[in-house]
Image: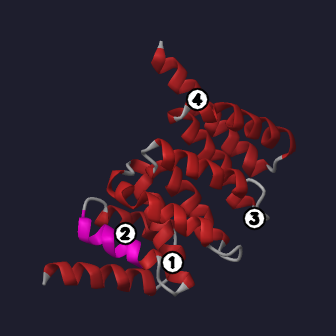
Amino acid sequence: MTILRRMESLERRLRSGTWGLARARATAEEICGDKVGIRALVRELFGEDVEVRKRAADVARRITDRDGGSLERYADELAGLLETLPVEESRTRWHLGMVVPRVARTRMQRLRAARTMSLLAADESNVVRCSAVEGLGLLALQEASLRDEAEEMVERFLRDGTKAMKCRVRAVQRLWAKAERGKK
């Protein structure tokens, strides 16, 4: 009965009220280590309601801001969802553009995510392009074969990108620098 209540609580949270960063973070905190809650969240990502899907993607992103471990088992499904979302769902694609690289654990998952990030880099939505450069930068930390492609994207976005894109590029560069310092 408790499991059912938690699932209903998540559904209610995603479907009602005003949505914002604080609510997304609170929802993520509530279900972060809860397998039943995570399963319910993933189910909502694949639902028909576009607004609920966007909110669920936002929660998934907030969960992976700290640790993607609870969503790793859904890496392939989330990558497939991101690849098939329509252009009109730019906010959902933006959030999943951050989630998919964070939960990719196998080489095949990272390479698949990198292909998707490369496609997203040409998206019409600025926020989606921002997630693409950050996502590819994260993937390049774990998959050395992606570093050249990531560096090329970083250079291109620094040269031709919007202010937001340049901000995300600098965040990627800081991550890379931190990782290099950690190797020494």
Local crowd size for mark 1, using a 10 Å CA cut-off: few (<14), some (14–19), many (≥20): many
Does 37 lie within the magenta span?
yes
Rendering coords of residue 2 (x, y %): 14, 80
Mark 4 and mark 3: span between their CA atoms?
Answer: 25 Å
Does 183 lie within the magenta span?
no
Rendering coords of residue 16 (x, y %): 44, 87
**Residue 111 position (above or below residue 79):** above
Question: Please, which residue is most extreme toward the right here?
Answer: 160
Mark 4 and mark 1: span between their CA atoms?
Answer: 32 Å
Asked which secondary structure carries label 4, the reply is: helix
Rendering coords of residue 131 (x, y %): 64, 53
Amino acid carrying mark 1 in the image:
Arg
Q: Residue at x 48, y 64 (%)?
A: 78
Question: Please, which residue is most extreme toward the front here?
Answer: 108
Task: Tell me where the magenta segment starts and ends, as one range.
Answer: 34-43
- Single out the mark in the foreground, 2 or 4: 4
State whether residue 141 appears in this view.
yes
- Single out the mark in the foreground, 2 or 3: 3
Residue assigned mark 3: 125
Rendering coords of residue 150 (x, y %): 68, 37
Q: Earlier in the sequence, mark 4 or mark 3?
A: 3
Viewer-side residue, 141 vs 20: 141
Residue assigned mark 2: 27
Q: Earlier in the sequence, mark 2 or mark 4?
A: 2
Residue assigned mark 1: 53
Residue assigned mark 4: 176
